[in-house]
Amino acid sequence: MTPTRYALAVIWLGVVLFLGSAYFATTNTAPFILPLLKKLAPGASNAQLHATHRVLRKLTHVAEYALLALLWFWAIAARAGRPVRATWIALLVCLACALADEAHQAFIPSRTGSLRDVVIDASGAAAALLIARARPTSRARDQMRSGVAVEPVD
């Protein structure tokens, strides 16, 4: 097992868990994000700005876990060469991370653990993995470019 193959995935896993800490609670991000949103949409009401802030936070969940899933998928698939297995393992890593993160947040006074966030996280991971698996492999792309179909050997 090559440790460098997993380094980026493990580092990003640490970043995701750090983003789940009290430092990134809504009360701590709002003073930075709400003024920016107010400049971008000066006519928006406070309720609209807070709703937009909430949506941005949930989209961040999707993006964090999409990247986490892809990094684990690429690391595992490169080693095992079995994309289906790599997909499931990457998804399980993301689910474990999401559950651990939300369980941790349940004990932080400025955060709340939420099963809805686990579903959002899993959706981001699953969507990224579906897209990654839908792309043809480099061998399949080469065959499509050359116009020659290679029949599998029985």
Image (cartoon, rainbow, N blue to C red):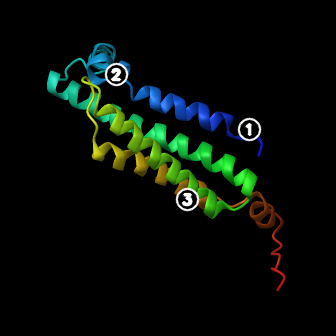
Q: Answer whether residue 45 is visible to the viewer in this image.
A: no
Instruction: Please state which of residues 34 and 143 is positioned toward the viewer in this rendering.
Output: 34
Looking at the rendered structure, the kind of residue marked 1 is Pro
Q: Position of residue 34 (x, y in %)?
A: 27, 18
Label annotation for residue 3: 1
- Tag 1 or tag 3, which sits nearer the N-term? 1
Q: Residues within 10 Å of mark 2 (few under 14, many from 20)?
A: some
- Residue 31: where, in percent of width, then height? 28, 13
Q: CA distance from mark 3 to mark 1?
A: 20 Å
| Relative depth, front residue between 95 and 136 | 95
Question: Which amino acid type is shown beneath numbered disc 2?
Answer: Ala
Q: In the structure shown, which secondary structural element does the residue marked by tag 2 occupy?
A: helix
Residue 151 position within the rendered picture, expressed as x and y whole percent measured from the top left: 81, 80
**Residue under the image location 19 percent in, 20 percent down:** 43
Left or right of residue 4, residue 122 in this image: left
Work out whether mark 1 precedes mark 2 in sequence or the reverse, and give the earlier one: 1
Q: CA distance from mark 3 to mark 2?
A: 30 Å
Left or right of 16 in this view: 47? left
Do tag 3 and tag 2 residues touch (Cβ < 8 Å)? no
Residue 22 appears in the figure: yes
Residue at the disc numbered 3: 88
10 Å crowding of disc 3: few (<14), some (14-19), many (20+): some
Residue at 16% from the left image edge and 21% from the top image edge: 46
As helix, strand or loop, the secondary structure at mark 1 comes to: helix
- Looking at the image, residue 73 sits to the left or right of residue 151; the answer is left
Q: Amino acid at mark 3?
A: Trp
The numbered dot on residue 22 is: 2
